[in-house]
Amino acid sequence: MTSAFVRLSLVVSAVALAACGGADEPGSARLKNLKEGMTITQAPDAMGEGPLTATYSDTMRLLNGYRRMRYLMNGADFNVVYSRDLPGDVKEPVLQAKETPIVFRNDTLLGWGWRYFVDEGMGKFQLPTPLRAIDTMTTPLLSDSAKKLDSVAAGASPVAPTKPDSTK
């Protein structure tokens, strides 16, 4: 029991340290040149070229090789740019272990890091979680008829209309 408690304590400590951010965040070497108040064009220049690639229309989600998600919230234009070190494709999901968010409002840098994103971005500005944003971009929304077809395929019996339309 004591060893299980020690292991649990170590895991909780590791998670707490990872959530604090700082120099251990992905792309932290690139983040050291950032300063609050920079514009959205100055910040990527200070960070250098990012390692992400994209094809076709996905290139609109890239800014200087970094993933960018844009939100219009409460009359403000928010851009969240994700710094990372590892090469990849913009189609990959956002993972805290690989990317660090940088938050801009109306093209001005407000702050960066997961702690800032959760407290300010999601808390104060009500930006959506990056995982939910990726899900809605990659998962097609089902129409009502598609939902009905899925329920029939799952074994539910189809429901006949109460008043058939005789004009069709």
Image (tube, helix red, strand yellow):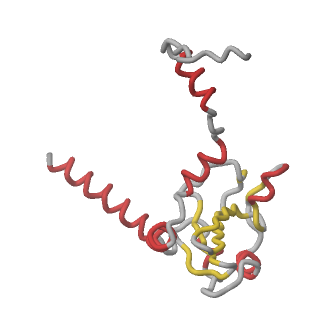
Q: Which residue appears at 52% of the width and 58% of the height?
A: 129
Q: Which residue appears at 63% of the width and 39% of the height?
A: 141
Name the quadrant of the C terminus.
top right
Q: Can residue 83 be seen in this view?
A: no
User: Horizontal and vertical percent for residue 69?
Assistant: 66, 62
Q: Which of 162 and 63 is in front in this view?
A: 162
Left or right, residue 93 beside residue 129: right
User: Horizontal and vertical percent for residue 47?
Assistant: 71, 76
Q: Quadrant of residue 140?
A: top right
Name the quadrant of the N terminus.
top left
From this view, report whether residue 24 is shown above or below residue 156.
below
Query: Can you name the residue that lies furthest to the left here?
Result: 1
Q: Which residue appears at 66% of the width and 69% of the height?
A: 79
Q: Is residue 86 visible?
A: yes
From this view, report whether residue 83 is shown above or below residue 135.
below
Left or right, residue 159 beside residue 102: left
Q: Which residue appears at 76% of the width and 66% of the height?
A: 63
Q: Nearer the viewer, residue 114 or 98?
A: 114
User: Horizontal and vertical percent for residue 74?
Assistant: 57, 71
Left or right, residue 60 beside residue 85: right
Q: Quadrant of residue 70?
A: bottom right
Query: Can you name the residue that lies furthest to the front here?
Result: 167
Left or right, residue 129 beside residue 42: left
User: Horizontal and vertical percent for residue 37?
Assistant: 63, 87
Q: Quadrant of residue 64?
A: bottom right
